[in-house]
Each structure stands twice: as structure tokens, then as C-alpha cells.
Image: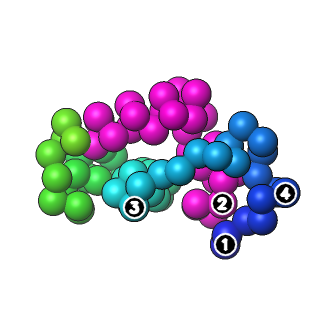
Amino acid sequence: MTKSLNEIPKELQNVYLTPRETDIVKLLAVNNSTKQVANELGISLWTVYNTLSRVTRRLNSNKYDLLYKVHQMGLID
């Protein structure tokens, strides 16, 4: 599933997500709610919100196109 650097848009090539950020985004990608993600990972709902806020800022994104950009990075199918 890992994409080559040539397949990833330039603006996303130097963006790094931590393992926890990746876990949260992957769980959201399969239609889990933020509450379900928090329960699944054993973390607070606020931790999920704060993590998503950090990721959307880093990707210069919003919550609506976050999953699209993460898909372009090759982190989710």
C-alpha cells in the first residue's frame, strides 16, 4: 500500500504522521465516529479531537478533505 514518492502530491511529500495519528485517521476512514475511535484506542474523545486538529493543520486541510489527502499519501486505501 505504500506509495512511491512520485505518486504523492508535492505538498504532502514532507508531511509525517505519528503512529497514533495514523491509527486515528485509519479508524475514521472506515466510518467510525470520533467517539468510537476513542473507545477503540482507549483514549479520551478530546485526544481524538486534538489529534485531528493537529493533522488537519499540518496537512493544510479541513475535516472534509483530510481522508482524501491521507489516501493520497498512501496511508489508507
Q: Secondary structure at mark 1?
A: loop
Q: Is residue 8 left or right of residue 68?
A: right
Q: Secondary structure at mark 2?
A: loop
Q: Is residue 27 visible to us here?
A: no
Q: Main secondary structure of the magenta part?
A: helix
**Disc 1 or 3, which lies upstream in sequence?**
1
Identify the residue at image location x=64%, y=46%. Answer: 14
CB under 8 Å between callouts 1 and 3?
no
Q: Residue furthest bottom?
A: 1
CB under 8 Å between callouts 1 and 2?
yes
**Disc 4 or 2, which lies upstream in sequence?**
4
Tell me the residue that label 2 is attached to. Answer: 74
> Dot 2 surroundings within 10 Å: few (below 14), some, or many (20 or more)?
some
> Dot 4 surroundings within 10 Å: few (below 14), some, or many (20 or more)?
few
Which is more foreground, mark 4 or mark 1?
4
Q: CA distance from mark 1 to mark 3?
A: 16 Å
Q: CA distance from mark 2 to mark 3?
A: 14 Å
Q: Viewer-proximal residue, 16 or 37? A: 16
Which residues are drawn in magenta? 48-77
